Image (tube, grey):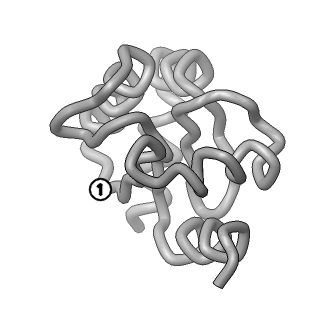
Amino acid sequence: MDTIDRIKEIVATHRIVIFMKGTPQFPQCGFSMRTVEALKACGADFHHVDVIAEPDVRQHLPRYSEWPTFPQVFIDGELVGGCDIVLGMYQSGDLQRMTSDAAA
């Protein structure tokens, strides 16, 4: 399976996915850490992919998503955005609604 197909499968298989640097337990950048904290604060059950451990995903995900930076959060197959967008959505309450809807 090529990398783009693998990314598509990950996004389709999991309701909430974060492609991040590191893991939720050990984030490797502040942006990934803050994004994970927002998802956890919403009580979201999410899947993660460590793009440092998977260089093919790190290389090809920006082409798939048309988003150049990490982390990247997908909910119900759609790109939500990166750290700034996710934090803004958390502050407005939109992230809680989206993650709650994805869990239903």
Depicted 50 relative to depicted 2: above or below: above
Q: Is residue 42 left or right of residue 52?
A: left
Q: Secondary structure at mark 1?
A: loop
Image quadrant in which the C terminus is located? bottom left
Name the residue that disc number 1 marks. 45
User: What amino acid is at disc 1?
Assistant: Asp
- Residue at 61% x, 22% y is 85
Q: For the residue carrying disc 1, how many other residues have a C-alpha within 10 Å: few (<14), some (14-19), or many (20+)? A: some
Q: For the view shown, which residue lies furthest in the left direction?
A: 25
Q: Is residue 85 left or right of residue 47?
A: right
User: Quick check: 3 above or below 39?
Assistant: below
Percent x, y of residue 19: 49, 46
Q: Residue at x 51, y 77 (%)?
A: 13
Give the left or right position of residue 33, taking residue 61 as reference.
Answer: left
Residue 66 position within the rendered picture, expressed as x and y whole percent measured from the top left: 83, 42
**Towards the viewer: 4 or 79:** 4
Residue drawn at x 19%, y 33% as measured from the top left:
26
